[in-house]
Amino acid sequence: MSTPNPPVPPPPAASGAVPPAPPRPFLSRLAALGPLLGLLALAAVATALNPEFLTVSNLANVLTRAAFTGIIAVGMTFVIISGGIDLSVGSLAALIAGVMILVMNALTASLGAGAATIALGMLTALVLGSLAGLFHGVTITLGRIEPFIVTLGTLGIYRAVLTYLAQGGAISLGLEVGDRYSPVYYGTLLGVPIPILVFAAVALLGGLVLNRTRYGRYVQAIGSNEQVARYAAINVTGIKIATYVLLGVCVGLATILYVPRLGSATPSTGLLWELDAIAAVIIGGTALKGGSGRIWGTVVGAILLVTIENVLNLTNIISVYLNAAVTGFVIILVAFFQRSRR
Amino acid sequence: MHTLKRLAVLSALLAGSLAFAQAKQVIGVSIPAADHGWTAGIVYHANEAKKALEQKYPNVQIIVKTAKDSNEQANQIQDLYTVNKINALVILPQESAPLTRPVADLKSKGVFVTVVDRGLTDPKAQDAYVAGDNTAFGRVAGQYFAQRLGAQGGNVVVLRGIPTVIDNQRVAAFNAAVAKNPKIKVLDARYGNWNRDDAFKVMQDYLTRFPKIDAVWASDDDMAVGVLRAIQQAGRKDIKFVVGGAGMKDMIKKVMDGDALIPVDVTYPPSMIADAMRLTVESRVTGKPMKATTIIPSVLVTKANAKQFYYPNSPF
C-alpha cells in the first residue's frame, strides 16, 4: 500500500504550502536556549521581588560563587560528553585545599609568606588535581572499572584523608600568607572580581577545545559511540584519560580560587559540589549518557543554580524550610524545556 | 550431702569472683567520628578524659570507639558488650531513633547506660542523661543582644544551623530573649547549616538586602568565621558585633584578645563528654547513684572568664 506518506515532502504536491522543514530547527534552537531563557526569567522575577538583585555588587557575588562549581562543571562537561562521570570532585577539592594549605604553611618557614610560597601552593593544587584525574582515567580505561564506581570510591577516600589530616577540625592558612593570598579571591581586575575572570577564561577555552579542535571532536565521537570511534582509529583510552586529567586540573584551579576565601579546609568543604557540577552540566543541555553537549550551557547552568539560592536569600516569600524544594523544582523545569532535543 | 557442700563452695567462689570483677570496671565510650569541628572536639575531650580517669582510678579501663553512622555505632556497642564485657556505656548517639533499641537491649543485660547530648526516643533505655542546654544556648545569646543593644535597639540578622529540633529550640529561645527589648528588630533568619561556606553566602545576601545591620547572631563559631569574612569583603562598618557559639578555640581567643566584633561567645562545650565520663566512672567506683539528668549550662564567655574555656591543643 502507499502508506509511507510522511517522508514525502520534496515533490510538487506541497508546492504552494509552507515547507515544513524550517520551523523544526527554529524550535529546537529555542529548546536549546532553554537554560538561558530560564535564567533570564529567574533574573526578571528576582528583580521584581527585590531590586537589589540587579546591583553590581550582588551580581558580582552571584557570579563569583558560580565560579567554583562552574569551573569544575566545564571540566565535567568533557567527562560526561565522553560518556563518563566523576562523583569525587567535591571531596577532591576539599583534599586539594587541605594539602595546599599544609604545603604553604610548611613553606612559610623557609621561603617566607611571599609570592614564591603561594605559587608553589598553587602548583601543588594543579599537580594533585591532575594526578587524581590520571588515576581516575587509568583505573577506568585500563582497569576497566565503571567510572561511577571508581569515583564513588575516591569520593570517600579523599574526604576521609582530609578529615584525617585535619583531625576532624580545620586546616587553616597562616595569617600572613592568608593576607598575601586573599586578593586572588577578593581582588578585582578592571573592576571585575578575579574568580569571574578565571571562570570566563576557562569557559572560553573549554568551548574552543570542545568545538574547534580535533580532541573535542574525538571526545564527542567517543561519547556517541565508543566502538565506532575505536574502529575509526581514535585513541579512545588516551582521549578518555585526558578528559579526567582535564577535570582534575579544573578542580585544582577552582580550589586555588576557593582557598583564599576563608583560608581553611574542613571536612565540610566542597560538600555536594559534585552534584552541583553535574546538575549544571545537565541543565546546560549535555546528555547524561554522553555524545553531545555545550560549554555555554554548562556556564548558564552553574549560574542558574547559584542564582536560585541568591534569590531565595533576597526574598521572604517562601518558607526557609522549602529552599531545597525550589532548587529541585527549577532543575526539573529547565530539564523539561530541554527534553525535545535529547 | 557432698554435692550440697560442693555447690556451697562453688557459689562462694562465684560470689568472690563477682566481687573481684566489680572492682575492675570496664567502661565503653561510643561517640560519633570527627566529621566536623564540634565532633572533633568530642573525640579530643573523650580521649583526654580516658587518660585522666584511667590514671586516677587504676581499676578502671576505658575503651573509646568512634562511629561514622548509626549502623556502625549499633554494631560497636554490641561488640563492646560481647567482646569487651563492659560494665557501663557512655554514648553520644549519632541519631536518636535508630539507637534506642540497641541501647535499651544493653541496659536490659545489666550495663549501666549514660546517654550524652542527643537523647534517645525512649528515656527508659538509659540510666543517666548528660546534655548541653540548647534553650540556654539561645537564651544567653539573646539576653546579651537585648542588653548590649540597649535603649537604642537595632537591626539583627540570624543564621540558623541545620533544620533540626536542636536548632528550633535555640532559635526560639533566642527570639524570646530578644523580644524583651522591643527596640530590637530581627530582620530575617536563614539556614547556614553550621558551615562556613554557607554562612558566608547567606551573610553576603543579608548585606545586599539590608542597608543597616547592627548585630549578627551566627549561632555557631564556624558560621561566625564565614560571617566575619563576608562583612570584611563588603567593607561594611555598620555591624557592631557578631556572636557565634560553641566555644571554638579561635573564637575564644578573639574574646580573650578583646576583638571588637567578637565581644563574647556562648558555650556548648564538646567537653561535656568528659563530664559524662567522669560522673559515670565516679558513680561506678564509689557505688553512689548518678543523677538521672545532668545539664551542662551554656554560659556567656567574656573577656574576663575566657581563659577557662581556652583549649589550645584541641582541634576545635
Image (cartoon, rainbow, N blue to C red):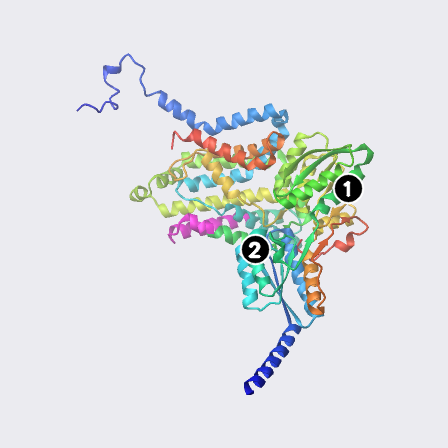
Across and down, in percent, residue B197 comes to: 61, 42
Q: Residue A216: which quarter of the image?
A: top left
- For badge 1, the amino acid type reads Gln
Find the residue positioned furthest to the top: A16
- Splitting the image into 4 quarters, where does residue A212 fall? top left
Main secondary-structure element of the magenta-colored stretch: helix
Indicate the quadrant where residue A62 lies. Answer: top right
Observer-nearest residue: B5 or B254? B5
Q: Is residue B141 visible?
A: yes
Q: Is residue A74 magenta?
A: no
Amino acid carrying mark 2 in the image: Leu
The mark closer to the camera, 2 or 1, is 2
- Magenta segment: A124-152
Does A154 sit left or right of A256 as displayed?
left
Can residue A106 be seen from the camera position used here? no
Residue at horizontal 45%, vertical 32%? A335
Q: Nearer the viewer, residue B109 or B172?
A: B109
| SS category of the residue bearing label 2 | helix
Q: Say which residue label 1 marks.
A: B143
Proximity of marks 2 and 1: CB atoms separated by less than 8 Å: no
Q: Return the residue nearer the eye: A45 or B160.
A: B160
Taking the image as shown, residue B22 lies to the left or right of residue A282, namely right
User: Which residue does the image show at 79% across and 36% down from the upper left?
Assistant: B149
Q: Position of residue B217 (x, y in %)?
A: 71, 40
Estimate the x, y position of residue B64 in percent, counting from the top left.
Answer: 61, 63
Q: Residue at x 52, y 25 (%)?
A: A41
- The quadrant of the image that shows the N terminus of chain B is bottom right
The circle on residue B99 is: 2
Picture layout, residue A3 above or below residue B10:
above
